[in-house]
Amino acid sequence: MQKQVLNYRIIIEPGKMGKKVVYNAYCNTLGLADYGNSIDEAVKNIKSLIKFHIECLLEDGTEVPTENTEEELITSTKVSIDGSGVTSQVIVA
């Protein structure tokens, strides 16, 4: 039996559901999203969804999408917008 290990990036973001703070979890490579009332719950939920999704893909004989997280670089930048409309000045730091 062949063993394959796949790595998937999971992004967690806080969000609001009414007045309540929840945590949204995304696995963009598989096109999946879920949420939880805590970060731990959001991670647990998205992992369960990833497992179910991959099992369904394998059952259907569909190729399982992969990503190479070890060679990716994830960064961010700050953007400052001074003014409004046509007179705005955008500064990328």
Image (tube, rainbow, N blue to C red):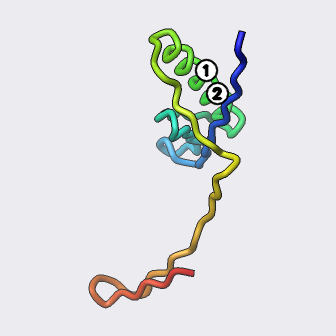
Q: What kind of element bears circle 1?
A: helix
Q: What kind of element bears circle 2?
A: helix
Residue farthest to the left? 86
Q: Position of residue 14 (x, y in %)?
A: 59, 49
With 33 as the anchor, is 14 left or right in this view? right
Residue on which the image places disc 1: 51
Number of marks in picture: 2
Q: Position of residue 46 (x, y in %)?
A: 60, 30
Q: Few, some or many C-alpha atoms within 10 Å of disc 2 (few <14, some 14-19, many ≥20)?
A: some
Q: Residue at x 62, y 27 (%)?
A: 45
Identify the amino acid type marked 1. Lys
**Mark carried by residue 17:** none
Give whichever of 43, 3 is nearer the camera. Answer: 3
Q: Few, some or many C-alpha atoms within 10 Å of disc 1 (few <14, some 14-19, many ≥20)?
A: few
With 81 as the anchor, is 45 left or right in this view? right
Spatial CA distance of label 2 from label 1 is 6 Å
Identify the amino acid type marked 2. Lys
Asked whether disc 2 touches disc 1, contact meaning CB atoms under 8 Å apart, the reply is: yes
Q: Residue at x 64, y 27 (%)?
A: 47
Q: Residue at x 55, y 40 (%)?
A: 26
Give whichever of 76, 25 is nearer the camera. Answer: 76
Give whichever of 40, 76 is nearer the camera. Answer: 76
Specify the quadrant that holds the N terminus.
Answer: top right
Residue on which the image places disc 2: 47
* Quadrant of res 10: top right
Give whichever of 30, 23 is nearer the camera. Answer: 30
Specify the quadrant that holds the C terminus.
Answer: bottom right
